[in-house]
Structures are given as structure tokens and as C-alpha cells.
Amino acid sequence: MEAASEELERRSKYLSSLIQKTKINPDGVEEKKREKEGKDQRQPEQQAVRVRAADMPPALQRRAFRCAREVLASMPKLDSKRLALTLKKEFDTSYGPAWHCIVGTSFGSYVTHSLGGFLYFSVDKVYILLFRTVVEPLDH
């Protein structure tokens, strides 16, 4: 039991350290670099995307942002289930099974994810949690 607690603590510290590192914006430019240049050349539709926490390669993050923006743009009214299903299927198809997606304007969560498979971001007032878990065969 103590080993599990230590592992949970280690993962929590790791995630906290990731949040402190340079975050990637939807256009792929690092925030620190943009701040140094004193420029903000993002398009209006990209300014609405904000990374809350991430343990995911930048290319996958950008794919999630693009997919979410496209689906939201096609909806006259927010359909959380449809957006979650679309993101899950997109990532299951492209990067293998066991992706999960939670979408809403207010929710809490505490999940365990695979290394490199976690993204929590928002588009306007819609919050999206996308994460991957390990799939292991059951021993009979």
C-alpha cells in the first residue's frame, strides 16, 4: 500500500513540474519565446484555447486543439457528448486504443494516465480533459 502511495506522490510531483515548464500554445509557439519578443500574433479563434495542464507531446496537443475547434465551430449549441466522442475516436484511431475524454463547463476529476497521454485545456468556457490509460489483457 505504501508503494502505491509513493508512486502516486511521484506522479503528482511530475505533473506539477510539467505545469511549471513552458507551455505550448495552439499555434505551437512557446509562451516564453513570445514574451521575449513582445509579440502576440495569434488569430482570434486561437486565443480562446488555453492549456491548463499537459503531459503530451506538442504535436498531439495541436491536433486536439484543432479537432476541438473544428467540432465546436460546427455546433450551434454545445454538445459535450458529441465533442468528447469525436476527440476520443480521433485519438483512438490515430494513436491506439484507451483514450478517454471528458467535456463540460464544470467538472472535477482525478485520473491516472499513461506517460505522455494527458491534456487538460479549455476553448472559451468549455473545458476538455483528454487522457490515455494502459490496456492490459486480463489473466484468466
Image (cartoon, helix red, strand yellow):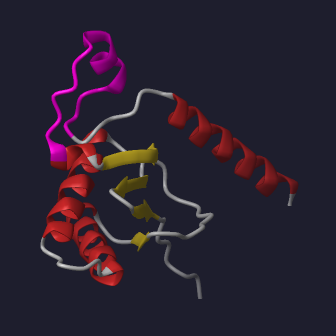
Q: Which residues are magenta?
A: 27-44
Q: Which of the pair 112/79 is nearer the observer?
A: 79
Is residue 44 shown above or below 123?
above
Q: Relative to 25, is 61 above or below?
A: below
Q: Is residue 126 left or right of residue 29?
A: right
Q: Position of residue 49 (x, y in %)?
A: 30, 49
- Quadrant that contains the C terminus: bottom right
**Outermost right residue:** 2
**Residue at image point 74% right, 46% down:** 9
The image quarter containing residue 109 is: bottom right
- Residue 123 painted magenta: no
Image x and y of residue 58, in percent: 29, 40
Q: Residue at x 48, y 65 (%)?
A: 134
Residue at (17, 49) in percent of width and height: 45
Where residue 120 sits in the image (x, y, percent)?
Answer: 44, 54
| Left or right side of 117 for 15 | right
Farthest residue in the top direction?
A: 36
Is 106 or 30 nearer to us in this picture? 106
Pick whichever, 18 or 127, lies toward us: 127
